Image (cartoon, rainbow, N blue to C red):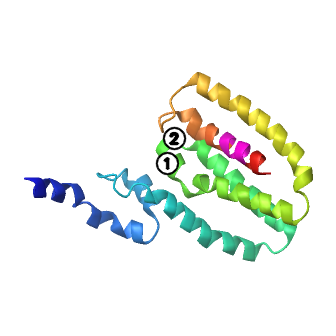
Amino acid sequence: LFSQQLYHYYSGLGEIQGSYWFYSSNWNMINNGLPRQPLFFHFWSLAVEEQFYVVWPILFLICKSARSKYIGIVCVLALSLINRVNSGVPLHAYLNSLTAAEPLSLGCLLCILQQDGLLEQAKRILIKAAYLSAAFLCVVFVRDHDLQITNTWLIKYGYSAIDILIVAIFA
């Protein structure tokens, strides 16, 4: 009886293991829903990270000048925000590569600003953005105390606000 339960529990791994090997488990979950067993659920974030490490160098090979790097990062961040806000399913917004890579993109922006000697000037803007983000997060949490994936405002707007707060702290 116990071995049948184990078999039933793990039998679905064969169908989805390709998405784990090719670092696309987040897209598999978006297209097919959450797996039956949560054993490897956390690999979705590893998939996003690996996708970022493949795409980001290509973006920087295309964007050679400092100005084009800023434009590239702003475009990635804008696409992320548009995707997050327009997603009809909170889980899709949460697992999407663009939205999940938003903090990584902001970290890269900080590094480029530092490298170009512009971080000190950007700090004033970041501090103002951090205050606005903190105020907005208060609204989000007053509106809905839920910290789960079911909090639509947190998924659509809150994570971006959290990202801005963290970037301001690190700047």
Three-letter residue code for mark 1: His
Which quadrant of the structure image shows residue 70? bottom right
142 horizontally vs 27: left or right: right
Q: Main secondary structure of the magenta part?
A: helix
Rendered residue at 66%/41% (across/down): 162
Rendered residue at 53%/26% (across/down): 145
Res. 12 visible in picture: yes
Q: Which residues are magenta?
A: 161-166
Which residue is outermost to the left?
A: 1
18 horizontally vs 134: left or right: left
User: Residue 88, which numbered label?
Assistant: 2
Q: Secondary structure at mark 2?
A: loop
Callout count: 2
Does the residue at mark 1 contact the one at mark 2 (Cβ under 8 Å)? yes
166 horizontally vs 1: left or right: right
Rendered residue at 41%/59% (across/down): 28
Q: Is residue 8 magenta?
A: no
- Percent coordinates x, y for residue 2 in the rendering: 11, 53
Which numbered disc, 1 or 2, marks the residue closer to the eye? 1
